[in-house]
Image (tube, helix red, strand yellow):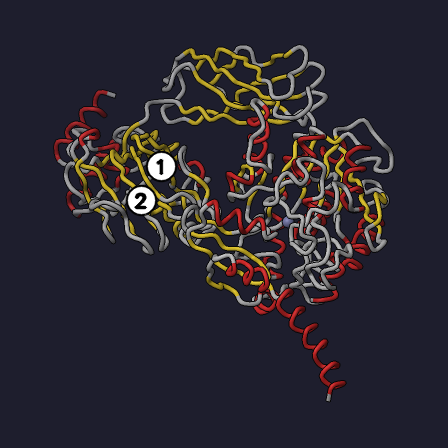
Amino acid sequence: MNLRARLIIPGLFFCTSLFSSDIYQSIRIFDPIPEKLRIIGSLGIPLDHINWKRDVFIDLILTKNERIALARKGIESTILINDLSAYYKSNNRSLQSRDFPLGSMQGNYTWDELNSRFDELNLLYPNIISERIIIGQSVEGRDIWAFKVSDNPNLNENEPKVLYTALTHAREPVGMMNLFFFVQRLAETYGVDSELSYLVDNREMWFVPVVNPDGYVFNEEIEPNGGGMHRKNRLETNCGDGTEKGVDINRNFGFDWGLDDVGSVPNPCGSTYRGEIQFSEPETEAVRDLLNNHNFNNVLHYHTFSNLYIHSFGNGSLPDEPELTKITDIGYEMARYNGYTVGNGLATVGYSVNGDAVDWTYGEKNMISFTPEVGSYQQGFWPSEDEIIELCSLQIHPNKIFALVSGPDIILESYQLSQEEITPGDQIVLEIMLKNRGLENSYNDINVNISSQNEYINIQTGSQVISGNIQSQEYYVLATPISISSNAVDGFLADILISIENESVYPRSFTIDLVIGERQTIFFDDFENGTLNWSLSGDWGLVQDTEQGNHSLTDSPDGEYQGGQETIALLIQDIDLSFINSPIIQYKAKWDIEEGWDFVRFQTFIQDLGWVSMGGIYTQTGSGQPAQTFGEQGYDGLQENWIEETIDLAQLNGARLSGFRFIQTSDDFEEGDGFIFDNFSISGFPSGLIGDYNMDSYVNIFDILGIVDQFIYEWEPTQRQIFFCDLDKNGSINIMDLIALSDLIAGL
Ligand SMILES: [Zn+2]
């Protein structure tokens, strides 16, 4: 009996402790005041992968044990997902991918698979992919290795160097997958894609796909099909053999190491355990030595998830200007198409860290550095297999930009014309501003060529040479007079091509569209005659706002908009833009919409695509939260004063559109005063001849006959016919217009 009890009880203990320490949950804590965040951090619960609604709630991933510890400190929580490993597996949708082979661990490569994947790429593309470069050994003795993509990859050339690392945290495999995806793209398009080929020829791109092989292999052992939740390395820290064991490599770097016990913890079993001393871990040392031995200009340390590019500093402070602008400009360009948020930890998710890789890379080594956090909270550490390729694709542009700016990189920053409207016979001046957005100075002369793509535009000093370099982050302005031929026609689109050539930068060309003629209003509504042009749902209605006439249209005339709704203001007038060049939409607007969570979008309807959200001067990119469709353009935050928004319909690339609307969406928490707009106009440059009723490009007797037919058969004229043949501008074509047109033709 005694013996039996002794045998069973230790077994039971073992099971219980493994059970509760290794079950990971997603929980929500309401009212996340700083004091609560401090307690969460001091328990070693990572605050770097969270879903956060400022002042409302914070969603966290932690172990069952950690949740119990929180409850003991008086912090209550709601469980969102009870067992994350099981959840990831049950939500997985498999995918067969032909172009990019996926791995066997919920689409991710296992340690063995990624090693053979590298061998395969190296064998196929030895001219641009280096041999393995061993940079250290893990606690359990595995090789930590790097490789280089460049021309002459096994030589050290004097080219700007950029580094990408991944899998510092063992449960974040998509960072590693994204590196293989990028490298495969570089290799397969070498000699085909001019920009990527330029990078291979003129940069040294270094990769460390796995910083923490032991932790990753441990996740393979506990969850062979994906879903393993171990984060740290596998150092023996006397916390059993489960996921509590080990040091958090991303708290073990020697910048602000151990600054406080919130951004990292001294408890060896905490998820954010920083180790006995800075750089105590061989994995951290390997990264440190690589950075010490090579002069990288910039480094990305890949993690998942939160859709962020996080820069220094972990303690919440910011780099001084002009450094901060340099860093954020690069971040914003990286986020151009994926809409990721750029900022330090405190600004983006409200937490602080110490001893992390980005701070040491930037703070100590002075290399521009970000932690990309790939994917959303909903996708988590183990996104469904069928989402991996999309997540990787969204990093192609950022990875490319990051390599480009590692050297000098000259772009057309902006341009300006000496007058807003251009008419035939004008003499104007075009001023262009170039910027070296790269981290190195350019060298040698820069040739700038400004050329006209048609006969109506004459560029006077088309070829210009900038003698000497443009320094990193500096601007250069140049100008040329331009004359417009008096034979140019109204509504004509005249393209000007600007090309930049220089030995040290990627050669670029940019097109500027000039439109000749006077912009004309096709449609205008200032709501002084009510809302007859619009079909409204929800609370949309008029409010008095004296600044823009008497009335404006808003989604919430009676105060704040409501939570959990979708409401629409649809323009019900048919607008024919087929004869309008360079159409734009403008409106005055102001708004107060919960930032990052609620949204108002302006959309156009396109056959085959449906409603498409339009980008303007003031739109932001959707965050991916329930009421903000990820990646779409819309309004949120606070805009207290009226602005004039411009939506350039050129972004639709000539697609046929057939409707416009504003759509408002909100989630269940916190509302705002809403969106209000006025003076809605559609304008452009009509192309056509006054009086050309049958649109044959001549004004003659057949146009008169056409109008007579219209009278006889009582046809409805098209908007285009009204636009060009309603000579007395009374809104319809009648006998007076016919007489005026006869006079016009007689006088021709
Ligand atoms: Zn991480």
Q: Which mark is residue 638?
A: 1
Amino acid type at mark 1: Leu
Left or right: 328 in relation to 684:
right
- Name the residue beneath numbered marker 2: 672
- In this view, the residue in front, 219 or 62, is 62
- Residue 399: x and y in percent read 65, 40
Instruction: Work out which quarter of the rendered image holds the C terminus and state it.
Output: top left
| Ligand 1 contact, mark 1 (Cβ < 8 Å) | no
- Residue 95: x and y in percent read 63, 63
Within 10 Å of disc 2 (Cα), the crowding (few <14, some 14-19, many 20+) is many
Is label 1 in contact with label 2 (beta carbons under 8 Å)? yes
Q: CA distance from mark 1 to mark 2?
A: 9 Å
Residue 312 seen in the current view: yes
Amino acid type at mark 2: Gly
Give the residue at x 71% y 64%.
242
With respect to residue 218, does 49 lie above or below? above
Left or right: 721 in relation to 28:
left
Give the residue at x 28% y 34%.
681
Left or right: 606 in relation to 134:
left
